[in-house]
Amino acid sequence: MAALFCGVALLCGCHRSEPPPSVPSPTPEPPTEMRGVWLSYIELDEMLSAASPQEAEAAIAEAMEACAKQELNTVFFHVRAHGDAYFPSAVWPAATAARALIADGFDPLACAVQEAHKREIALHAWVNPYRIGTTAAEGDRFLKNGVWYYQPDSAQVRQNLLEGVREILDNYAVDGVHFDDYFYPSGMAQTAEAFEEIPDGVAVAQWRRTQVDALVSGVYGLCRQRGRLFGVSPAADIEKNRTRSYADVTRWMTEAGYIDYICPQLYVGFRHETKPFTALLTQWAGLPRRQGVKLYIGLALYKVGLAHDPYAGTGAAEWAQDEDIIPRQIEQVQNAADGYVLFRYGNLI
């Protein structure tokens, strides 16, 4: 278990304390088999809203104990979901559900790290990079499909995002940092949007990919300097990642300086009409990867028992008809990838 601590002292207790020293150390070895779960802001809001510090601490400890009982070895803990923070941050305002607790001196992230490590579970700080939500925040941002996002091409935005990651790495003994698929939102025009100032002669799509590349590379550098892992969980469609979200995942997987692992969200069943699970898994497993880059697979635990999967076509009823989809998917993942991550904790219990 020593490798998980990354050479950084654990925070003492679940309240604010002096940050541990930021000493570069070797990047920890990932587990032989990733068995992870995403613990999202949805569960955190349920745990923390109107809770006393003692109740919040007990709820977080209970969650980590539940993960341990399921023999999971990694928790992806939502530290920033909508331009806010589930820890005392100098960069981002406190999340609404955690605001009173943080004001009282309780630190949800410090507590989560302590309770996870107590059970030999790694904890990765999960960040939504650009999504803000339905309420506008300060700074360079834009509105798309009723949701606000930070501008990826803003130098100030990038600086704030990197500072937000740096304070996590410097103040908490997290084992890694994790981005999900909230890069550019779907529905972006193929020509420059009103907020974009793209140099003459530069293709719009390439400009956008360059902005995302710069952020991903920057976060990887911070994590590497401090001996932590960094990975991304993109959508299942490889081409749409590149052309719609402007997340060049195939580049990140093959070139040095971007990621330690990739975890595509294969949230489909075996009988999905156009994108069945086995075909997607085979496609991702067949992509070239730089030595050391791990492939994990995100699985749709939330769909178990779902009466109707609206995008699955002829396979729409599969999740209601078959009770063993997730175990069968795990079996396939064990033969093709380096582990799996379940979405999400609320469905685990």
Image (spheres, rainbow, N blue to C red):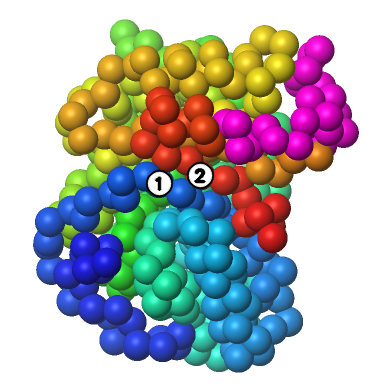
Q: Earlier in the sequence, mark 2 or mark 1?
A: 1
Classify mark 1: helix, strand or loop: strand
- How many residues crowd mark 2 within 10 Å: few (<14), some (14–19), many (20+)? many
What amino acid type is highlighted by mark number 1?
Met
Residue for badge 1:
34
Q: Label 2 to label 1, Cα distance in Å?
A: 7 Å
The residue shown at (62%, 50%) is 344
Residue 341's disc is 2
What amino acid type is highlighted by mark number 2?
Val
Considering only vertical position in the picture, is 165 above or below 308?
below
Quadrant that contains the N terminus: bottom left
Considering only vertical position in the picture, is 197 above or below 80?
above
Across and down, in percent, residue 83 comes to: 54, 56
User: In the rendered image, is residue 274 in sight?
Assistant: yes
Left or right of 329? Residue 315 is right
Quadrant that contains the C terminus: bottom right
The residue shown at (55%, 72%) is 65
Left or right of 234? Residue 175 is left
The residue shown at (60%, 31%) is 328
Across and down, in percent, residue 37 comes to: 53, 52
- The residue range painted magenta reads 306-329
User: In the rendered image, is residue 130 in sight?
Assistant: no
Residue closer to the observer: 94 or 7: 7
Residue 189's disc is none
Q: Quadrant of residue 275?
A: top right
Left or right of 320? Residue 71 is left
